[in-house]
Image: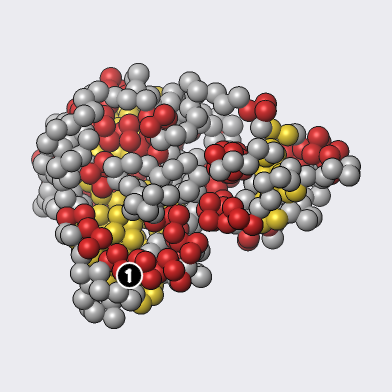
């Protein structure tokens, strides 16, 4: 089963998990399933029009899904999806 | 040529074949600009000074406060209240009197950034806000200079090297900042004190490698560090052909208004706060009346354990957008946080969502502790 990894910044919207299993054939399906389980996560990933926010990057293993097939990128069981938001602390 | 004293000082560098006399001489002739003299800027400044980088620019427009000392190791008790750049400069010169430290006790803005940055070989981003990060990136791209990036939050750190001449820039990765209020800053969300030590040291390492021309830098890679798992992960960064500043058809060819771009009020755009703000004594008075407003505390739950106002509803700022349905827009509301920053963002968010009877507790629970109830802890 593919897995999701998020930084601590986002774990508060995932009941304190930084790593969890994903369900779905594509990145889109997996994120839809995720946000239906954890609705608090939705505004952090998507804007009100339902587009992935521009400060959120999603990496499939090492590659940004923007350089793959975007949200339509297929997921394999061994994949790790990483959400990388911009943070600004210094 | 290095003097005998310098040869002794840099002995441990001279013993490394990759540095040696030639490399040390390179560092001596090199220059770096550190943007920010806080958590990240502290270790960067101290290590670059110690390493013998000949000329170091240090830019910050802040004074040393007690809450800085948990992580900003360039400063100490003796520099409380002093300008950060002066405090750090004194410490750098104590480590290495050879260092030429050029201080800029001013904000980094579209008006001065190009002129300041043009004098340095490498730019290092140790800032703590989005406008400065986008400004630093655009300056680096427009001047054709490498930018060593680092950013931190709680237990997570990111680092990379951006050089748009040969690879991606910060905008290629993050085309736009998050909407104001969605992503908390360290002042709002906290940070493990040693985290900037780790990420800042990595930034200093990358800057030294760039100046020496050795090794493989983080260019084309983003380091994701997590202190809780003690994990170092890397993802691949590529140039975005649509990047607005370094892509195939750049739309940004000169510096812009970064505060407007990031949707935050800046020095030039004062918010007309009077309409929004309520002072602590005024709130105390209002709470005694029959028309007491609802108190909405937008801090994180663990902060309420330190100090809280009785009866306040707790919805952390980050979850507010998703929990608007829990609030009654007809009822008057006063939003509060630690010092007033998050609550003013929450007021902005609530106003944008159609709430009309919302006020911001000016100065947050700190002001309350100062002016109404001194028994509350300040943190
Ligand atoms: Zn770019």
Residue A60 point in image, percent of width and height: 23, 65
Badge 1 residue CB within 8 Å of ligand 1: no
Q: Is residue B143 above or below residue B46?
A: above
Residue sitting at 20 percent across and 69 percent down?
A74
Residue B127 point in image, percent of width and height: 40, 39
Quarter of the figure with the N terminus of chain B: top left
Q: Is residue B52 above or below residue B196?
A: above
Residue B336 point in image, percent of width and height: 67, 45
Quarter holding residue B133: top left
**For residue B326, side relative to residue B236 (left or right):** right
Quarter holding residue B146: top left
Q: Chain of mark 1?
A: A
- Comparing B245 with B13, the one in front is B245
**For residue B344, side relative to residue B332 (left or right):** left
Residue sitting at 34 percent across and 23 percent down?
B110
Q: Is residue B88 above or below residue B112?
A: below
Residue B160 point in image, percent of width and height: 25, 49
Residue sitting at 34 percent across and 20 percent down?
B112
- The answer to whether residue B121 of the structure is visible from this angle is no
- Comparing A72 with B103, the one in front is A72
Q: Is residue B198 above or below residue B1?
A: below
Dot 1: within a 10 Å radius of its alpha carbon, few (fewer than 14), some, or many (20 or more) residues?
many
Q: Which of the colour schemes (rainbow, by chain, secondary structure, one colour) is used?
A: secondary structure
The secondary element bearing badge 1 is classed as helix
**For residue B36, side relative to residue B207 (left or right):** right
Residue tagged 1: A30
Quarter holding residue A2: bottom left
Residue sitting at 17 percent across and 45 percent down?
B240
């Amino acid at each position: 089963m593919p897995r999701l990894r998020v930084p601590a910044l986002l774990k508060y919207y995932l009941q304190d998990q930084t790593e969890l299993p994903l369900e779905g054939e594509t990145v889109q399906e997996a994120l839809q399933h995720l946000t239906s389980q954890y609705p608090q996560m939705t505004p952090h990933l998507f804007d009100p029009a339902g587009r992935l926010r521009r400060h959120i990057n999603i990496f499939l293993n090492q590659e940004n899904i923007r350089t793959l097939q975007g949200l339509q990128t297929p997921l394999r069981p061994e994949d790790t999806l990483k959400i990388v938001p911009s943070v600004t602390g210094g | 040529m290095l003097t005998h004293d310098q040869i002794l000082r840099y002995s441990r560098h001279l013993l490394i074949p990759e540095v040696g006399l030639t490399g040390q001489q390179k560092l001596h002739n090199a220059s770096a600009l550190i943007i920010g003299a806080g958590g990240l800027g502290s270790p960067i400044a101290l290590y670059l000074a110690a390493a013998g980088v000949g000329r170091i620019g240090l830019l910050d427009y802040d004074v040393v406060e007690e809450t800085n000392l948990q992580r900003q190791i360039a400063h100490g008790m003796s520099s409380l209240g002093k300008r950060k750049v002066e405090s750090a400069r004194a410490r750098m010169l104590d480590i290495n009197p050879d260092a030429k430290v050029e201080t800029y006790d001013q904000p980094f803005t579209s008006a001065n950034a190009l002129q300041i940055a043009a004098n340095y070989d490498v730019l290092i981003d140790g800032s703590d806000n989005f406008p400065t990060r986008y400004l630093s990136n655009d300056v680096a791209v427009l001047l054709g200079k490498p930018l060593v990036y680092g950013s931190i939050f709680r237990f997570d750190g990111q680092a990379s090297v951006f050089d748009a001449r040969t690879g991606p820039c910060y905008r290629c990765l993050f085309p736009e900042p998050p909407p104001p209020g969605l992503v908390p800053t360290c002042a709002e969300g906290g940070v493990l004190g040693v985290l900037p030590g780790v990420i800042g040291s990595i930034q200093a390492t990358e800057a030294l490698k760039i100046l020496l021309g050795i090794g493989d830098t983080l260019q084309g890679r983003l380091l994701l560090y997590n202190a809780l798992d003690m994990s170092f992960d890397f993802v691949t960064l590529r140039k975005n052909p649509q990047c607005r500043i370094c892509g195939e058809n750049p739309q940004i060819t000169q510096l812009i208004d970064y505060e407007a771009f990031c949707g935050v009020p800046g020095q030039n755009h004062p918010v007309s706060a009077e309409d929004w703000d309520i002072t602590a004594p005024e709130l105390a008075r209002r709470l005694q009346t029959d028309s007491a407003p609802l108190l909405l505390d937008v801090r994180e739950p663990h902060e309420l354990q330190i100090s809280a106002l009785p009866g306040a509803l707790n919805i952390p700022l980050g979850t507010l957008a998703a929990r608007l349905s829990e609030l009654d827009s007809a009822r008057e509301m006063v939003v509060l946080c630690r010092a007033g920053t998050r609550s003013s963002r929450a007021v902005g968010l609530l106003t944008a969502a159609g709430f009309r009877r919302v006020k911001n507790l000016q100065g947050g629970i700190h002001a309350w502790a100062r002016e109404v109830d001194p028994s509350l802890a300040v943190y």
